[in-house]
Amino acid sequence: MRLHYIQHVPFEGPANIQGWAENQGWQISGTHLYRLEKLPSPDELDWLVIMGGPMNIYEEKDYPWLAAEKKFIGLKKSSSGQP
């Protein structure tokens, strides 16, 4: 299995989620949006974990990467057929 996490701020990483996934033998990868890293193709992952942060979903003016993230989440949901 391939788990991907989206991290919004440097002080909230995957912590125990990463350890759990590694113990399962899963591949783990992440996108650090605060570094403006590119999101992967939805087909490149099986599980998606979205980390928290101080922003709200409507604050695209302050966090311009929110628009791309919301689009990515919609693409992943529609391609998986799962909630």
Image: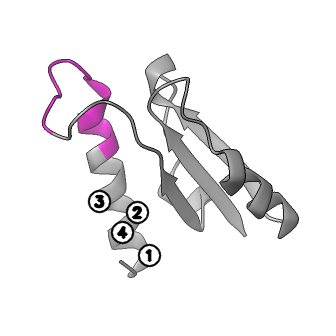
Vertical relation: 4 (above or below) 63:
below
Identify the residue under disc 4.
77
The CA span between labels 4 and 3 is 5 Å
Report which quarter residue 20 is drawn in.
bottom right
At 27% from the left and 47% from the top, the residue drawn is 70
* In magenta segment, residue 14: no
Secondary structure of residue under mark 2: helix
The CA span between labels 3 and 1 is 10 Å
Mark 4 vs 3: CB contact within 8 A: yes
Identify the residue under disc 3.
74
Mark 2 vs 3: CB contact within 8 A: yes
Q: Nearer the viewer, residue 56 or 30?
A: 56
Any mark on residue 76, and which?
Answer: 2
Whichever of labels 3 and 1 marks the residue nearer the N terminus, that label is 3
The CA span between labels 4 and 2 is 4 Å
Q: Image check: 12 left or right of 3?
A: left
At 86% from the left and 65% from the top, the residue drawn is 23
At 60% from the left and 37% from the top, the residue drawn is 13
Secondary structure of residue under mark 1: helix
The amino acid at mark 3 is: Gly
Identify the residue under disc 1.
80
